[in-house]
Amino acid sequence: MSISFVVRGDYIQLDQLLKAVGLVGSGGAAHAAVDAGDVEVDGRPEMRKRAKLRPGQRVRFGGEEIVLVTDEAAGQGA
């Protein structure tokens, strides 16, 4: 399943994204998931907890895929 997430501003940090979409309950849980190698960004394992993610990127974690979009793309049903 795919979740669309609207990025407000230039970017969102990976740990904040995982919390914002409800895939983890805390920043510590997000950091643990990244440390364990359980998070992929654009098909590759991401080891930076605070990686800056921008619209157009895709994150996979826990059987979910998060697609980052802009406000404009969200308004067009992207």
Image: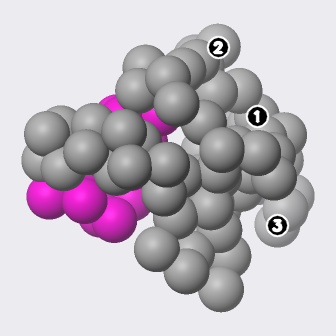
**Numbered disc 2: secondary structure:** loop
Q: Is residue 23 magenta?
A: yes
Mark 1 near mark 3, Cβ–Cβ under 8 Å? no
Q: Is residue 67 above or below residue 27?
A: below
* Structural crowding at the residue carrying mark 3, measured as other residues with C-alpha within 10 Å and reported as few (<14), some (14–19) or many (≥20): few
Q: Amino acid at mark 1?
A: Pro
Circle nearer the N terminus (3, 2):
2
Residue in front for this viewpoint, 20 or 34: 34
Tell which tag, 3 or 2, sits nearer the viewer: 2
Circle nearer the N terminus (1, 3):
1
**Numbered disc 3: secondary structure:** loop
Q: Which residue is mark 2?
A: 10
Circle nearer the N terminus (2, 1):
2
Q: Which residue is mark 1?
A: 55
Tell which tag, 1 or 3, sits nearer the viewer: 1
**Numbered disc 1: secondary structure:** loop
Residue drawn at (71%, 27%) of the image:
54
Q: Which residue is mark 3?
A: 77
Q: Amino acid at mark 3?
A: Gly
Could you say which quadrant of the image residue 64 lies in? bottom right
Spatial separation of the CA atoms under disc 3 and disc 2: 20 Å
Residue that sits furthest to the bottom in the current view: 1
Residue 43 image position (x, y, % from top left):
81, 52
* Residue 11 seen from this side: yes
Residue 48 image position (x, y, % from top left):
49, 23
Quarter holding the N terminus?
Answer: bottom right
Q: Is residue 36 above or below residue 3?
A: above
Q: Is residue 37 magenta?
A: no
* Structural crowding at the residue carrying mark 1, measured as other residues with C-alpha within 10 Å and reported as few (<14), some (14–19) or many (≥20): some
